[in-house]
Amino acid sequence: MTTYLAVYLGSLILALLATPAVIYLARRIGAVDRPGVRTIHKRPTPRIGGVAIFIAATVMIGSVVFVNNNIGEAFRSVRLQLATLLACCGAIFAVGLADDLKGLPARVKFLAELLAAIVLCIAGVRITDIELTSQWVLPLGGWGCLLTILWIVGVTNAVNLSDGLDGLAAGICSIACGVIAIFAVHSGVTVMAVFMLALLGSLSGFLVFNFNPARIFMGDCGSLFLGFTIAAASVMCMTKSAAMVGLALPALALGIPIFDTLFSMLRRFLERRSMFAPDRSHFHHKLLDLGLQQKHAVLTIYLATLAAAGMGLFMLVSEDLGVLLIFACVLLLIVLLFRVVGAVRLHETVDRLRDKHVTAQCQRNERKTFEHMQLRFRQVQGEKQWWQAVCEAADRMDFAWVALKTTHADGRVEEEIWRAAQTRPDLSRIVTMTIPLEENPDGATRQFEIAICANGSLEAAGRRATLFSRLLDESVARKASCGMRQASEVLRTTQDT
């Protein structure tokens, strides 16, 4: 117990000493986060606070190796896994620091997290089976590596996304570290207990400077390092105990960031945006929209996290189905909390899923029509068949009318018009577009005017206009190519004669 206390206090003191130095360094090198559209702070703030957290935690973790007691012996007995874990955590920290200083694409960071998780799996840090009850153990086999990678990468990104308010990510991670430390001590996993207490101490010291109004942000170097380390530590705890509680407790303690990430991914998927696209619809943003001040929003999330983790601790003294029941009930309460603050709306989500399905079906039908007309245009011979193919394409693509205007070199104007056989279209829902074609060899210029019925949406009308334009481009290019071949054959015949 003395070693545990020394690790916590040592990392706390180191963080208190290192954070002011990091603030000074960040200002000197310009590593500050300036106010912008997506930010809430009003003044430039240093953003590499994760450096202080990393230094304080790793120094104390590394020093335990030299302690001459049972805990030090436990550290030395898992040297390979420990070295691999520290190396991977250090690599993730370095990637985050590079992003804070220079900026990295989201895909690069994701790839780094994925590679680090794979390295841990190779080193033996992976979930092999899950003890659902005392009589029912679920062996995972090769699926264990996939579950481990998903868990580590998912938690890392969840913590990263939660770093949106002063002290929010640091406070949530502190609670998660405390919960995992309790479980580790309870299960006799001393190595992970030391890891979590070192992180808890460094976060406690850092929060003195990070709580609202923050004098420094942890940045990606802090949030990625914390998320990755906490996720990996929970896997190691489960590896040693095989109990479901090893993952269930951290999942509840990080329930708000995890669900926030899942709902954000769902929201971006339904809005057809990139999974890495930023927005202002996270859980903490919804609390601010309800009128809470930043400090009160953070404290609210602290209380919710403490409540979820506190109820989750009852799993330590429960058995079999009791563990599953507690876990399911707390997860349900977290989801209800998201529903209450408006971070997720069931009816709206169902409507968007239905709209997305309809849009996807329309796109498939439009694609089939386009591919059919491609073959049709390739069989065209002569202007008359070409115009018939144009009219057929317009009919299949639900156009109101198509007009081809040809202006000859001598000023003559010819116009051909196709109109839909249906009743008079609603002109307020018509999208018109002019498409110029390449000039003919005889000097005549041609252009199309197309009118598209916007029955579904303007986006659908735009897609059909794009597909029709592609058909015209391909057919004109094919006619030009045929013309060049015919001219070449005539020239060759003349030369032979």
Image (cartoon, rainbow, N blue to C red):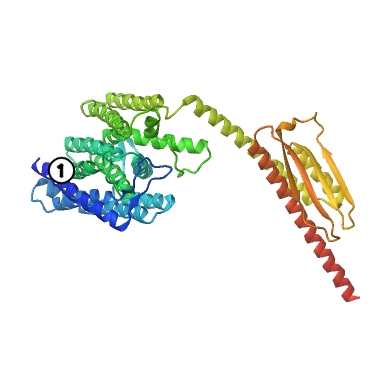
Q: Secondary structure at mark 1?
A: helix
Q: Is residue 141 left or right of residue 376?
A: left
Quarter of the figure that contains the N terminus: top left
Image-quadrant location for residue 285: top left
Residue 135 seen anywhere in this rendered image of the structure: no
Question: Label 1 amino acid?
Answer: Tyr
Q: Residues within 10 Å of mark 1 (few under 14, many from 20)?
A: many
Q: How many marks?
A: 1
Quarter of the figure that contains the C terminus: bottom right
Q: Is residue 470 left or right of residue 333?
A: right
Residue 465 seen anywhere in this rendered image of the structure: yes
- Of 364 and 294, nearer the camera is 294
Q: What x and y, as percent, mark residue 244?
A: 28, 33
Q: What x and y, as percent, mark residue 44?
A: 34, 48
Q: What x and y, as percent, mark residue 247?
A: 29, 36
Relative vertical location of residue 142 with respect to residue 90 in this rendering, above or below: above
Q: Which residue is mark 1?
A: 8
Q: Is residue 477 left or right of residue 135?
A: right
- Of 84 and 410, nearer the camera is 410
Pick out the residue farthest to the bottom: 496
Q: What x and y, as percent, mark residue 274?
A: 49, 44
Q: Is residue 462 left or right of residue 272?
A: right
Pick out the residue farthest to the front: 43
Pick out the residue farthest to the right: 497
